[in-house]
Amino acid sequence: MVVFHQSILLFASAIVLFAVQHANSSSVETVHYNVTGYRGRHLGGGCNLFQGKWVVDSSFPPYESSGCPFIDYEFDCQKYGRPDKQYLKYAWKPDSCNLPRFDGLDFLKRWKGKKIMFVGDSLSLNQWQSFLCLIHASVPSANTNLVRKEILSYATFQDYDVTIYLYHSTYLVDIAQENIGRVLKLDSIDRGNDAWKGMDALVFNTWHWWLHRGDSQPWDYVQDGSTVSKDMDRLVAFSKGLSTWAQWVNQNVDSSKTKVFFQGISPSHYDGKEWGSDSKSCYGEREPLQGSTYPAGLPPAVDVVKKTLSSMQKPVVLLDITTLSQLRKDAHPSGYGGSTSGNDCSHWCLPGVPDTWNQLLYALL
């Protein structure tokens, strides 16, 4: 059960009740986990799902990439020649409880007749495909209708009338084609306005593209109010864009009908100095960092996200996946993403880290 509480500062809280299965016992302990908007603080001795470490689990991975029909080539590291498999064997273990395994059949039964939408960039694609694979692993013979398009894709598990959508939106705010060129409009959300409505759960994500420059930057100008510039501080732009998204949620989401999540900041691993190594990138990394902290600390975008969520009127739960993902320098496609060019240390192999994001999402749903 989720109970929302609003403080004087309009600080939204979500208290999530879920069952935790002990690894060495058949008993089930009920734990109240207080995600308190974004902070993940304890409630009455409960469990912070996002604080823990990676441990070897012989039962992993939860599925094989060869058995999931939803994985794109850029995430299918085993198919495209990654020689090691140990990275597939790590499970996330919170410090003070056990994280429930993702049960696709249980999810379909509980969410029968409902709709979930992932909204964001290619990291949302990464998470969406993981979510579909986790469900498929539980019901491999289920009747499924898959539709892939440039902006809106979806998979419907027809026996349960559950639809999992993906809406591609690189910045959440709009990019408009105008006379001067492509304009990133920090105060406008028109493109996804109608498509995002009417969902039972929304999982938003953006950040990855805010730092892109040069030929990979998909806009020519940035507009803040009436001011149009060739560029601006990217962290400031991100903050302004995220504030526009927050206003959209406040104005358009009925919290009694729709649960809203923000995916958090997914890290990249292009500089070994961040984790105390001479490595130039994630290429060749074979194991996670030990412990529960990342030497370089959190990226500044995390503070922007937390500040934005803490000021919102409507409750939004942060999937606080940054630190746990930072520890997984070994889990990117690197040179095994099915592409002949580039070294991908931003996205994630499937099976892999996004399965844990979805395991956390499953616990909170």
Image: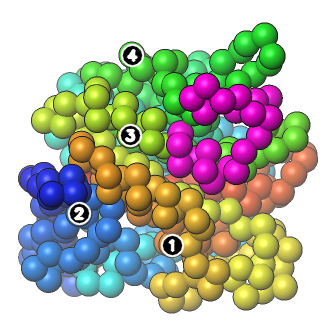
Amino acid type of the residue that numbered disc 2 sits on in the rendered structure: Thr
Q: Which residues are magenta?
A: 218-241
Nearer mark to the viewer, of 3 and 4: 3
**Mark 1 to mark 2 CA distance (whole Å):** 18 Å
Query: Which residue position holds label 3?
Result: 246
Is 52 included in the stretch rendered in magenta? no
Task: Answer with mark 2 or mark 3, whichever residue precedes in sequence.
Answer: 2
For the residues labelled 3 and 1, say whether their Cβ atoms are less than 8 Å apart. Answer: no
Task: Answer with mark 3 or mark 4, whichever residue precedes in sequence.
Answer: 4
Residue 239 x/y as whole percent: 53, 49
**Mark 4 to mark 1 CA distance (whole Å):** 33 Å
User: Quarter of the image holding residue 131?
Assistant: top left
Amino acid type of the residue that numbered disc 1 sits on in the rendered structure: Thr
Question: In the rendering, which numbered label is found on residue 15?
Answer: none
Task: Answer with mark 3 or mark 1, whichever residue precedes in sequence.
Answer: 3
Query: Which residue position holds label 1?
Result: 323
Nearer mark to the viewer, of 4 and 1: 4
Residue 12 x/y as whole percent: 22, 54
